[in-house]
Amino acid sequence: LIGTPASGNLEYNGQFFGTDSAGSRAQLQRIVRTTAVSNPTSPVSASIDFTSIPAWVERITIMFRSVSLSGTANPLFQLGTGSTTYTTSGYLGAGSSLDASTVSTAAFTAGFGLNISSAANVIHGSIVITNIDSNIWVASGVFARSDANTTTTGGSISLGAALTAVRVTTSGTDTFDAGTVNIIYEG
């Protein structure tokens, strides 16, 4: 907040924003946490969707806590447009795993991906997806695994329309069998 707003009012960059209330402060901050999806095994889920993302969003953070998959597929993060059509190709980027002293990498084109390849791993961490220009988005993420190793990812995608949704899915037919997934978005 800049300046001294009139009693009971909020100002931003010298402009009146609204009354000093919890709702006005939340709009001014424009950081929204959605409802977490915990234990995505009921019902069994091959993907977790976060829809109705507003047009003003510039950055989305997808968070994992104790997430695991039923098999050896890799987690993928896909972006949706319009009345939720998910983009499943055209992603540029890769994921890397550091296992003790060995680094393994995998290119991903169907989404921003994590190079995990082990059903035994439980994953913790986050990926941040940021609007760089118009409908072009970039991503970077760091995750820790239960086997005391780390996984990183990065990439970009040019969407054909404004982003409206995010899907957390897998590179195969595996389902999520434990953990909590949530997002925050901000303007």
Image (tube, rainbow, N blue to C red):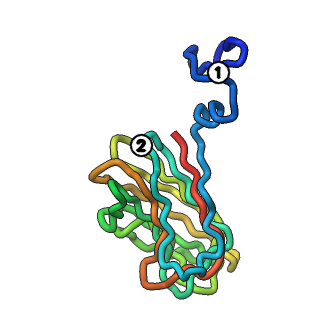
Amino acid type for the residue under numbered disc 1: Leu
Residue at image mark 2: 55
CA gap between label 2 and label 1 equals 23 Å
The residue at the far left in this view is: 160
Left or right of residue 156: residue 5: right
Q: Please state the horizontal and vertical placement of residue 73, each as a whole percent of the image.
A: 48, 82
Say above or below: 139 vs 109: above
User: Relative to the observer, which residue lies in front, 143 or 180?
Assistant: 180
Q: Are circles 2 and 1 on residues that touch, CB within 8 Å?
A: no
The image quarter containing residue 88 is bottom left
Q: Please state the horizontal and vertical placement of residue 39, each as a whole percent of the image.
A: 64, 76
Is the N terminus in the top left, top right, bottom left or bottom right quadrant? top right
Amino acid type for the residue under numbered disc 2: Ala
Q: Please state the horizontal and vertical placement of residue 178, each as a whole percent of the image.
A: 64, 79
Work out whether residue 101 can be spotted: no
Residue at image mark 1: 10
State the residue at coordinates (35%, 68%): 109
State the residue at coordinates (62%, 31%): 24
Q: Local crowd at mark 1 within 10 Å, few (<14), some, or many (≥20)?
A: many
Work out whether residue 20 can be spotted: yes
Q: Please state the horizontal and vertical placement of residue 82, each as a whole percent of the image.
A: 33, 54
Q: Of helix, strand and loop, which one carries label 1?
A: strand
State the residue at coordinates (59%, 46%): 32
The residue at the far right in this view is: 7
User: Relative to the observer, which residue lies in front, 34 or 154?
Assistant: 34
User: Relative to the observer, which residue lies in front, 9 or 183?
Assistant: 9
Say above or below: 148 vs 91: below
Q: Of helix, strand and loop, which one carries label 2?
A: loop
Task: Return the mark for residue 116.
Answer: none
Q: Local crowd at mark 2 within 10 Å, few (<14), some, or many (≥20)?
A: few
